[in-house]
């Protein structure tokens, strides 16, 4: 049954692994944002082959499991000379996987900008980068912030999968502690509570932001 | 080992469990989705609260954590489930929580005029729900449920971590037995893609079919 003394004795160890979990979440999230933006621009490329390849790549990444992609990066990449540490491989896998989701978000955001906005930019003789930076992106970003925020939370909850490629984040820490004491109840419960305590308030915050954005418009 | 042999070996040993877990977890998730999605809108506060706790707990903690909790921690409380049951239960409960939200949102998005029309036609509450509200809500749910179906299929790869012999587990076995790492994991990705593709195309067809003649 539940043992409070044991629970408190392992709590500091699990909490100290939380930096790995949160670190991996944010680095992967940044990667997903940048890569997602690049993908969403490339998909609109006038060169047909580029848009086709990007579409196919996104589709493939989206319909295959993150866990298998992590194995692929961690075990297959070294065969072609790219050996990555568990953290790097995990962040790369998680980041690339979610970049395909975020690129969809960006794409629909970009498509919702009225065509007139592009025409105005042309009429004002804006360069391509000026058009993106000064006209298109400022209109695309604010409405998609809640959606992107939800993906951040989703990615946070996906990080336990990184334990499969030997990254010692909070779930793996709890598993190691459990294996040495044969007590899994406390460790896994603590990990579950940590996830709930961090993700529930964040998702409520995003809901509030969402309704505020809706009333503003 | 040839690439083709690896492909065959993965399918032969692992496909059954992957499809089994997917199938039963989908049924469980849909069932829970409808029950708790409706319960979330109940006029009784207690029922709404229970549904809310279920939804937030299973959405708020990670699926892999839930899987490990049921498999490793639950036996300590005296409940021992097989790996297969654990896989189906954890994935079903987790996706059930997401489906509940999809069901609830869709039902709430049916215009209130529809309910009022039902009342004006002297329909009972059950009649209004089954004949007017749910058929319309269902059409709205389909795209989201289709996405969840693909996500659920992908998530079944996690059951390999509780020693269930699905496609991913078999790939790990083959990898350590043959060292054909590149072929094994490439074929594994290809197989998941082959399973998911008709599913996503099928959902799109179904979506087009049920929304026929509707704006």
Image: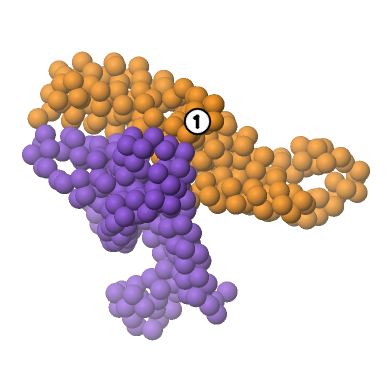
Chain colours: A orange, B purple
Measured as percent of width and height from the top left, residue B70 is found at 21, 40
- Residue named by callout 1: A79
In the rendered structure, the residue with mark 1 lies on which chain?
A
Q: Nearer the viewer, residue A165 or A178?
A: A165
Q: Is residue B1 visible?
A: yes
Measured as percent of width and height from the top left, residue A95 is found at 53, 35
Does A200 sit left or right of A137 as displayed?
left
Count residues near mark 1 (Cα–Cα under 10 Å), then give few for <14, some for 14-19, many for 20+: few
How many marks the image carries: the answer is 1
Q: Nearer the viewer, residue A76 or A113?
A: A76
Residue located 43% across and 37% down the image? B181
Residue located 55% across and 51% down the image? A59
Q: Nearer the viewer, residue B53 or A14?
A: A14
User: For the view shown, which residue lies furthest in the front direction?
Assistant: B1
Q: Is residue B124 above or below residue A154?
A: below
Residue located 14% across and 25% down the image? A182
Q: Is residue B58 above or below residue A173?
A: below
Residue at disc 1, secondary structure: helix
Residue located 36% across and 26% down the image? A166
Quadrant of the image for the C terminus of chain B? Answer: bottom right
Q: Is residue A106 visible?
A: no
Quadrant of the image for the N terminus of chain B? Answer: top left
Q: Quadrant of residue A197?
A: top left
Measured as percent of width and height from the top left, residue B46 is found at 23, 51
Measured as percent of width and height from the top left, residue A177 is found at 23, 21
Does B48 sit left or right of A166 as displayed?
left
Q: Is residue A180 above or below residue B149?
A: above
Q: Nearer the viewer, residue B36 or B113?
A: B36
């Amino acid at each position: 049954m539940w043992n409070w003394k044991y629970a408190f004795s392992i709590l500091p160890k699990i909490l100290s692994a939380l930096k790995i979990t949160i670190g991996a979440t944010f680095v992967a999230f940044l990667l997903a944002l940048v890569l997602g933006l690049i993908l969403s621009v490339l998909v609109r490329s006038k060169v047909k082959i580029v848009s086709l390849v990007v579409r196919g790549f996104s589709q493939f990444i989206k319909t295959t499991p993150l866990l298998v992609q992590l194995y692929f990066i961690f075990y297959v990449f070294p065969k072609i000379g790219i050996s990555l540490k568990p953290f790097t491989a995990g962040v790369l896998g998680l980041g690339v996987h979610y970049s395909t989701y975020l690129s969809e978000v960006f794409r629909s955001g970009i498509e919702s900008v009225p065509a007139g906005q592009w025409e105005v930019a042309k009429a004002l003789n804006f360069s391509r980068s000026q058009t993106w930076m000064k006209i298109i992106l400022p209109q695309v970003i604010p409405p998609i912030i809640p959606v992107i925020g939800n993906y951040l939370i989703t990615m946070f909850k996906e990080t336990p999968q990184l334990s499969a490629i030997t990254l010692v984040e909070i779930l793996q820490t709890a598993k190691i502690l459990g294996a040495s004491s044969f007590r899994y109840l406390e460790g896994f419960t603590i990990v579950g509570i940590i996830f709930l305590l961090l993700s529930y308030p964040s998702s409520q915050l995003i809901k509030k932001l969402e309704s505020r954005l809706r009333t503003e418009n | 080992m040839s690439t083709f042999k690896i492909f065959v070996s993965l399918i032969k040993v692992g496909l059954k469990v992957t499809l089994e877990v997917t199938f039963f977890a989908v049924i469980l998730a849909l069932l829970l989705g409808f029950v708790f999605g409706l319960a979330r809108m109940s006029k009784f506060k207690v029922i709404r609260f229970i549904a809310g706790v279920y939804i937030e707990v299973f959405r708020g903690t990670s699926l892999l954590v839930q899987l490990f909790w049921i498999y490793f921690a639950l036996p300590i409380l005296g409940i021992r489930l097989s790996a297969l049951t654990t896989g189906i239960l954890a994935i079903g409960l987790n996706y059930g929580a997401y489906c509940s939200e999809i069901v609830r949102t869709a039902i709430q998005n049916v215009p209130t005029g529809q309910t009022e029309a039902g009342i004006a036609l002297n329909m009972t509450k059950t009649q209004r729900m089954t004949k007017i509200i749910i058929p319309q809500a269902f059409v709205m749910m389909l795209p989201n449920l289709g996405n969840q179906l693909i996500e659920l299929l992908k998530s079944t790869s996690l059951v390999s971590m509780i020693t269930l012999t699905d496609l991913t587990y078999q790939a790990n076995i083959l990898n350590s037995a043959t060292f054909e790492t590149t072929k094994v994991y490439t074929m594994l990705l290809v197989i998941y893609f082959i399973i998911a593709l008709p599913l996503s195309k099928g959902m799109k067809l179904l979506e087009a079919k049920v929304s026929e003649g509707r704006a």
